[in-house]
Structures are given as structure tokens and as C-alpha cells.
Amino acid sequence: MVETLASSTDSIDTWADFVRSIEAELDSHRDRAFVAAPEEAFAAAAAVRKPWSKARVIEWLSFQTYYEYQAILFISKWLQSTPETDALVLLCQQIEDEANHFNWLNQHLEQLGARLSDWQPLPEIVDWVETFYGSLPDTIARLAAHNLAGESGACRSFDSIVPFLPEDLQKTMRRIMPDEHFHLKLGRRILSKYCITDKQKAQARHYALRVAELETRAIRAFNSKLAAMEA
Ligand SMILES: [Fe+2]
Ligand SMILES: [Fe+2]
């Protein structure tokens, strides 16, 4: 029988100390961005603009719709080399979630008169989302980078962004957020199970913190684009 998180005797809310310490490092990196370097945080620079302009909503929504679409692509690619069957099953469930998110957000984008095919991601975003996530070597690297670091960043940025969005999009984001929390939790759980040696724990930390660097570069570039667009 394939073991899943649901059938595991351990709770999904239980995870290892080394995973908590990686998350604490990520949190302090992001705290610094929100407080000391707002150009590195998705919503902090826009805190005085409420609600966001239509152009800003379209730009952010294009990025988020692109991200959900790319998540379907890179996670499905990972399945070809995931020998851990419980992780495989969970990643299949995650692809379904990301596909729903893509579909819902794409509908909002089209209602706003925009099309994802007309939007070009910045090179810093491609480096982070397509190149880095698309080339991670194994389950530990992938779950540390995307599910632990990437999804915790998404949860945090959604919390800060949602109040600035139009009401109907806020409703969709509130539907998406529990799924992203679940993806974070499955990352914590799988890493707790498969990172046994110090070398594996160090590998997980390395890939998670690399995301913080790539994310910072991408968000800074994205905020510069928004600022230029609204100037
Ligand atoms: Fe998603
Ligand atoms: Fe997700």
C-alpha cells in the first residue's frame, strides 16, 4: 500500500526541528525585506495605494497566473524522477491544485481584458521559476526549494497582497490560500521523513535559502517594473 500523509500515523502538523530552523532563517530574510528593504517585498512598497490600480492588478495577476502554470509544468516533470511513492502521490495532488489555481486566475485575467500569452516574465523571474525550480535534482532539493521556501513565500505575500485586490479576486485568493498552506505542510512533512543525514539536512537548507536569494532579485526587478509603469 502506498503510504500517504493522510494514512501516516504522524500528523501532518508535526515536523522536524531542522525544518523549523530553515523556516526561521527564511522568515528573518523576509522580515528584513518587509521592514528594511520594501523594494524586495511584493506589497510593502504599495502599502499606501489601496486598492491597487487596474494596471498593477493585471501585472501581479499575470505573474501569479504564470507562476501557477509553470508550477504545473515543473512539478509534472519532477514526477519522472520521484522514487519516494508517498511524495509522488502528494505531488500529483499538488498538480491538480495548481491547475485549479491557474484556471481560476486565468479567468480573472481574461475578465480584466488581459491575456497571459501577451505577458512576458522578467529574466529574474524566469531564472527563479523556470530555470531553478525546473532543474532541481531530487525530492529533497525540490521540496526544500519549492514547497518549503517557495510556498511559504507565497503564503506570506498573499497575506500582504490580498487586501489591495478587487473583491472578486480576493475571494478567489482566499480559496487558493489553504491549498498553498497544504503544499507547505507536505514539504515540511516529506523533508522531515527523508532528510536523515546531516548532509541531506544541509542540502535542504542550501536549496531553500537559494530560493530566498532568487525571490529577492525577482521581486526587486518586478517592483522596479511596476514603479516605472505607474510613474
Ligand atoms: Fe498554487
Ligand atoms: Fe502551491
Image: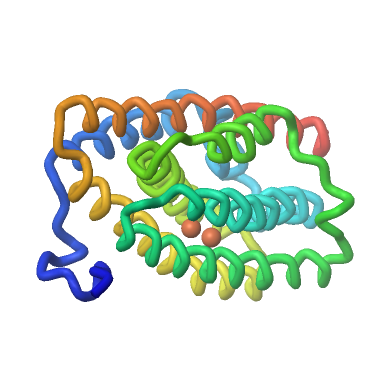
Q: Residue at x 82, y 41 (%)?
A: 120
State the quadrant of the C terminus. Answer: top right
Give the side of residue 173 with respect to residue 17, left or right: right
Q: Of 150 and 114, which appears nearest the observer?
A: 150
Q: Is residue 88 above or below residue 141?
A: below
Q: Is residue 31 above or below residue 51?
A: above
Whole-percent x, y for residue 71 in the image: 58, 53
Q: Of 163 and 105, which appears nearest the observer?
A: 105
Whole-percent x, y for residue 102 in the image: 65, 65
Give the side of residue 79 with respect to residue 193, left or right: right
Residue 39, quarter of picture: top right
Q: Is residue 177 above or below residue 29?
A: below
Q: Of 207 and 220, which appears nearest the observer?
A: 207
Give the colour scheme shown. Answer: rainbow
Q: Residue at x 55, y 34 (%)?
A: 135
Q: Residue at x 63, y 61 (%)?
A: 165
State the quadrant of the N terminus. Answer: bottom left
Give the side of residue 91 with respect to residue 98, left or right: left
Whole-percent x, y for residue 94 in the image: 47, 64
Total label count? 0
Q: Residue at x 36, y 52 (%)?
A: 83
Q: Of 60 and 93, which appears nearest the observer?
A: 93
Whole-percent x, y for residue 111 in the image: 82, 72
